[in-house]
Image (spheres, rainbow, N blue to C red):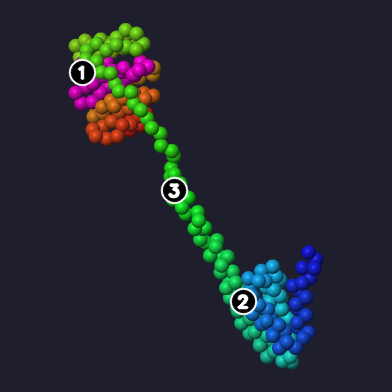
Amino acid sequence: MNARRLYAPSWLLLALLPWWLGLALLLAIAALLLFAGERLQEHARLLRLALRWGLPGVLFAVQRALGGDAFAWAMALLGALVGFTLLAGLEAWLDRGRREQVAQPDLRDWPSLALAPIGPGAVVVELAAPQWAEGSCPDPRGGEARWEAGSYVLAGGGTVDRVLARASFSPDGRWFVAGTPRGLVLVDRDQGCSHRLRGWTLCGWHDGPWLAREAGAAMAWREVLGQC
């Protein structure tokens, strides 16, 4: 590690050599990176450091050869502008393959990505068909719901008014549904609440009632009540 730290600054010693000799050496290193970079991958980093540190050394040699006056320093600064611009272009060219590899994903991944499932897995819901009763409706929890003059009287207490003589219980007895001229009444016996749903029909049972409006898809009761 210490030897590598000393490697880069050591190229400043080119300031002690004739400028044309140092420039020829740097041009040779640049040519190696351009035309033999693949074979010299293990040494590419050290060769780049040689260019970065060797260029200031050559520029000092140039100003020394020109006499060290203001004109010499101006030429050295102009050479620095041109030299480091060319060096930046060289490094950008050498790194072009690495940038393309990062920007573009491995094409071998695309078939697996195309076949990968999108979104959550589908769940198949099988609905139990509702058992409609005309008039009195048997209660799975015992007894029956009696229809009397436009109302259903539930066995456990409670009355559902302004309904037709057509009703159904869920298989577990929690839910009671009665038809109306324009929809239905949904009663949650466990929660002690009822909902009048205009335009909805009962499709079946699965963890509660599933309902649909006109020709739409069936929806669970939680979704339906959230919209009403």
Left or right of 18? Residue 120 is left
Density class for disc 3 (Cα within 10 Å; few <14, some 14-19, many ≥20) is few
Query: Which residue is disc 2 drawn over?
Result: 34
Image quarter where the C terminus lies is top left
Q: Is residue 161 visible?
A: no
Q: Is residue 185 above or below residue 124?
A: above
Left or right of 175? Residue 92 is right
Q: Is residue 128 above or below residue 144?
A: below
Query: Which residue is disc 3 drawn over?
Result: 115
Q: Is residue 179 visible?
A: yes
From the top left corner, tell me how far across and down residue 36 is, in percent. 64, 75
Task: Please state which amino acid type lies under the numbered disc 3.
Answer: Leu
From the top left corner, tell me how far across and down residue 172 is, in percent. 37, 16
Q: Main secondary structure of the magenta part?
A: strand
**Quadrant of residue 55 within the rendered picture:** bottom right
Q: Is residue 91 above or below residue 140?
A: below
Task: Please state which amino acid type lies under the numbered disc 1.
Answer: Leu
Q: Nearer the viewer, residue 135 or 109?
A: 109
The span shown in magenta is 160-187
Residue at left offset 35%, top offset 17%: 171
Closer to the N terminus: mark 1 or mark 2?
A: 2
Density class for disc 2 (Cα within 10 Å; few <14, some 14-19, many ≥20) is some
From the top left corner, tell me how far across and down residue 194 is, in percent. 32, 20
Marks 3/2: CA distance? 41 Å
Residue at left offset 28%, top offset 18%: 131
Residue at left offset 73%, top offset 81%: 57
The verdict on residue 43 being magenta is no
- Residue 164 is tagged as 1
Left or right of 170? Residue 151 is left
Q: Is residue 114 above or below residue 198?
A: below
Q: Nearer the viewer, residue 183 or 39?
A: 39
From the top left corner, tell me how far across and down residue 186 is, in percent. 30, 22
